[in-house]
Image (cartoon, rainbow, N blue to C red):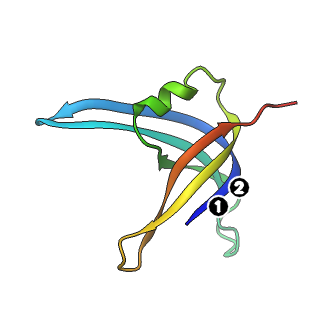
Amino acid sequence: MQFKSNGRVTGAKFFKDSVEGKAYDSTTVYVEVGLDERSGAAKGSATTGFAWGDSGNYQRIKHLPFPFEAELTYELLTNGKGQSKQVLVDLKPVKQA
């Protein structure tokens, strides 16, 4: 299941290398998310890292001034045993007026 949301991208990093003979190629994007204020024990926001494909995705956004607003497309995935995770599948910077 996919869904879209607008958000503030605060950072990004990539890793492309080989570790003990196994190749790795990934990008992580950090997005500002609200803290759960319902309990009264938290307020404000924090950043959460989302996997976003390979290092080519980092190359698409590295020139942008951080932080920036973006339209984010997520996919909700599960292993079938109950726990699900959100994966970032697309990011489109939103032009500021």
Residue at left 35%, top 79%?
81
* Pick the front one: 60 or 38: 60
Q: Position of residue 29 (x, y in %)?
A: 52, 41
Q: Residues within 10 Å of mark 1 (few under 14, many from 20)?
A: few
Say which quadrant the N terminus sits in: bottom right
Vertical placement of residue 35 versus 49, above or below: below
Identity, as a three-letter code, of the amino acid under mark 2 = Gly
**Between discs 2 and 1, the one toward the N terminus:** 1
Q: Quadrant of residue 20?
A: top left
Query: Which residue, as the protein is rendered here, is positioned at the far left?
Result: 20
State how far apart marks 2 and 1 are (Cα). Answer: 6 Å
Image quarter for residue 90?
top right
Q: Are marks 2 and 1 in contact (CB under 8 Å)?
A: yes
Q: Residue at x 63, y 60 (%)?
A: 3
Residue that mark 2 sits on: 44
Could you say whether the residue bearing mark 1 is in a helix, strand or loop?
loop
| Residue ID for mark 1 | 35
Q: Quadrant of the C terminus?
A: top right
